[in-house]
Structure formats: structure tokens, C-alpha cells
Amino acid sequence: DQQVKQNSPSLSVQEGRISILNCDYTNSMFDYFLWYKKYPAEGPTFLISISSIKDKNEDGRFTVFLNKSAKHLSLHIVPSQPGDSAVYFCAACGTSYGKLTFGQGTILTVHP
Amino acid sequence: GAVVSQHPSRVICKSGTSVKIECRSLDFQATTMFWYRQFPKKSLMLMATSNEGSKATYEQGVEKDKFLINHASLTLSTLTVTSAHPEDSSFYICSAQGDGENTIYFGEGSWLTVV
């Protein structure tokens, strides 16, 4: 039972353009969502998060949008840079903060 | 710099032996740590929640007698894979929970290969 889903295994974007990574969830008890960037054989690096009381959170080039009614969130990276190439995971948690449920990940490749 | 450190980063062990992986919070106290496992090209799956001074809470399907977790201090949790088998080969990652929002820190991960 995949409670957090990233349906796009990969995404390829030109440098300078916008990257949009999507994530859907099924558990209505989730109230905090996070995005992580991960390189092979390394631990995840936190990027940005959003609480369910908000619908948008912005941090530099990264913006996360949350649509609670659709149980959908997205990460926008603009402008995309080659150094952004990595696997991006969305994660969610409920009242037990820190106990994360991860999506399957999306491989982002940003071409120069 | 890293705030959560895992050791070893890579380990190879023989079938039937046990191997211990350490997870340390470097500059904060973590009453709660989490252990995840990642299979190749798959997501991170939560194995257990490690609570300082008490028993770990295991997720459904995770054998607690095989994956022993000890959280004896506020800065250290250990995962011991007992009687390891090749199917235990995986990437194991810990995280530690600090105070406040956005304070879940992940370790660098540990590659376990059982031969």
C-alpha cells in the first residue's frame, strides 16, 4: 500500500527552465510534507517542507505547493541548474513527526 | 557539516555473522531516531523508531529479533543485523529528530553487503 506516490520515475529539463516534480498521497492523516534530494549511496538532504495549514512555501529557487483537497503536492525548481540533477523524494508524516513515509522518488536530470 | 553521522559507510560481512551500524547525532540530543532501508532504485522504507531508554518500535513486517536496535544514549542508536543473509544486503539510513520544525536530520547511510 503505497501511501505516498511519485508517479514519474524520471524528469528531464533544460537548464534555466522550470522543473516540476509531483507527489500524491492517500492518507488524510498526513499533515506535514517534505521534499528531499538524494544522491546515490548518500543520505537524503532536506530541501523544503510545508504544513497542511499552508498551500505554498517558498525558499529561494524551490517552491512547494500543497492541494489538500486533491491530496497532491508539487515541488517547483526555477531556474533549474545542472547541479539539481539528483533523485527527489517527497515524504509525509502525521502526528508522529519524524516518522516519514517516502514516495518512490523521481530522477531529475537538468541538461546544460 | 553533517549533524548525523553513520558508521560504517560500507561493510561486507559473511552470511551468518552479525554486523552493527551506528548512528550518532553530533551536536544535539535525539530522543528519537529512525532507521530506514532502501533497496536499489526503490524508496526508503521505515524499519523502526528508536527511542532513547526504551524499546524500539518496529514497522509491520520487520523482524525485531533480526534487526536489533539499541538507543542507549541521547546521541547514539545502533542497528545490529543478526545472522545476516544475502537478502539483507541493502542501504541502511538513520535519521534523528531534533527540536522544532525542519529538524529531521539524516545520516550518510551505510551500505551492507552480505556474501
Image (cartoon, coloured by chain):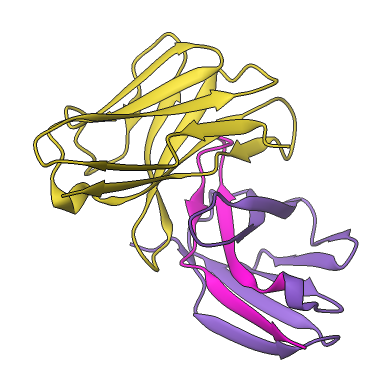
Chain A colour is purple
Q: Position of residue B7 (x, y in %)?
A: 46, 32
Count of numbered labels shown in the rendering: 0
Nearest the eye: B70 or A69:
B70
Residue reaching furthest to the left: B16
Query: For chain B, what colour was chosen?
Result: yellow
Residue placed at 40% from the left, 68% from the top? B41
* Nearest to the observer: residue B14 or residue B66: B14
Residue B104's place in the image compared with A2, above or below, is: above
Q: Residue at x 51, y 62 (%)?
A: A40
Looking at the picture, how far across and down is residue A89, in whole percent? 57, 62
Instruction: Report x, y in % for residue A24.
Output: 55, 70
**Residue placed most toward the observer, B14 or A76:** B14
Q: Give the side of residue B53 with respect to residue B29, left or right.
A: left
Task: Identify the residue shown where x is 46% and y is 67%.
Answer: A104
- Residue A33 appears in the rendering: no
Residue at 38% from the left image edge and 11% from the top image edge: B54
On whether residue A104 falls in the magenta region, the answer is yes
Left or right relative to B72: residue A34: right
User: Is residue B96 something that shows in the picture?
Assistant: yes
The quadrant in which residue A111 appears is: bottom right
Magenta region, residue range: A84-112
Check the picture and name the quadrant holding the N terminus of chain B: top right
Reply yes or no: does residue A48 show up in magenta: no
